[in-house]
Image (cartoon, rainbow, N blue to C red):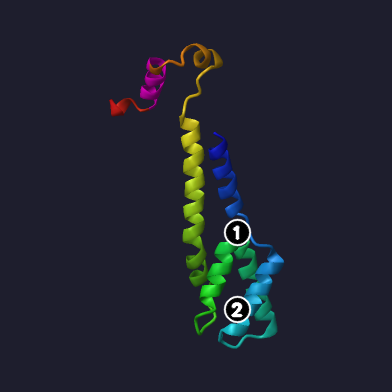
Amino acid sequence: MEQQNEVERILSLSLAPLSRVEIMRELLKLKVKTNSRNMDAASLELQLEVYADELTRFPADCVLQALQDAGRQKWWPDWGTLEGLVTPIQDLRQRLLRDLKAHDNMIPVRSEKERRYNNGPKALGDFLNKLHPDDQ
């Protein structure tokens, strides 16, 4: 159980977002590295703000990797391109965490009395068979 809790904790931490300030700094680096269509200052600022707001929904390392990958391209990415880079990794982590929590909830808990008086091999085998009745 401790290991499962630790895995859940690590997966939850891996979903933590990058701070908005750090996202803006990385977006500005990307802007300098790539070409884009001409924009007035207000439009550029608005675009950076929108991208930063959207990227705060994603895990920090996914955002950094996506911006680094986008920086290898010649052109400034549209939002769909960036979202396509960050979403698959986030979805995988969320699915793993959801499955781990669901699996935990599916395992019945033996009562203290049951554990104390029925720890023999037969009792344990019966308990395990109840978990997966289709395997018999």
Q: Which residues are magenta?
A: 122-131
84 vs 10, nearest the viewer: 10
What secondary structure is marked by label 2? helix
Label 1 belongs to which residue?
A: 57
The numbered mark, 2 or 1, whose residue comes first in the sequence reads 2
Residue 73, percent from left and from top: 49, 81
Q: Residue at x 58, y 48 (%)?
A: 10
Camera-side mark, 2 or 1: 2
Query: Is the residue 116 above or below the residue 103 in the image?
Result: above
Q: Position of residue 83 (x, y in %)?
A: 51, 66
Q: Residue furthest right?
A: 21
Query: Residue 104 placed where, x, y %?
Result: 50, 34
Question: Looking at the rendering, in which quadrant would you find the C terminus?
Answer: top left
Magenta run includes residue 126: yes
> Does residue 20 appear to the left or right of 135 in the view shown?
right
Q: Is residue 90 visible?
A: yes
**Residue 82 among magenta residues:** no
Residue at 50% across, 85% down: 74
Element carrying mark 1: loop
What amino acid type is highlighted by mark number 2?
Leu
Q: Is residue 78 visible?
A: no
- Relative to 22, say whether 39 is above or below: below
Examine the image and state in which quarter residue 49 appears: bottom right
- Is residue 55 shown left or right of residue 95? right
Question: How many marks overall?
Answer: 2
On the picture, is 81 further left or further right than 25?
left
Q: Nearer the viewer, residue 35 or 112?
A: 112
By secondary structure, the bulk of the magenta-drawn segment is best described as helix
Q: Quadrant of residue 26?
A: bottom right
The dot on residue 30 is 2
Q: Residue at x 50, y 23 (%)?
A: 109
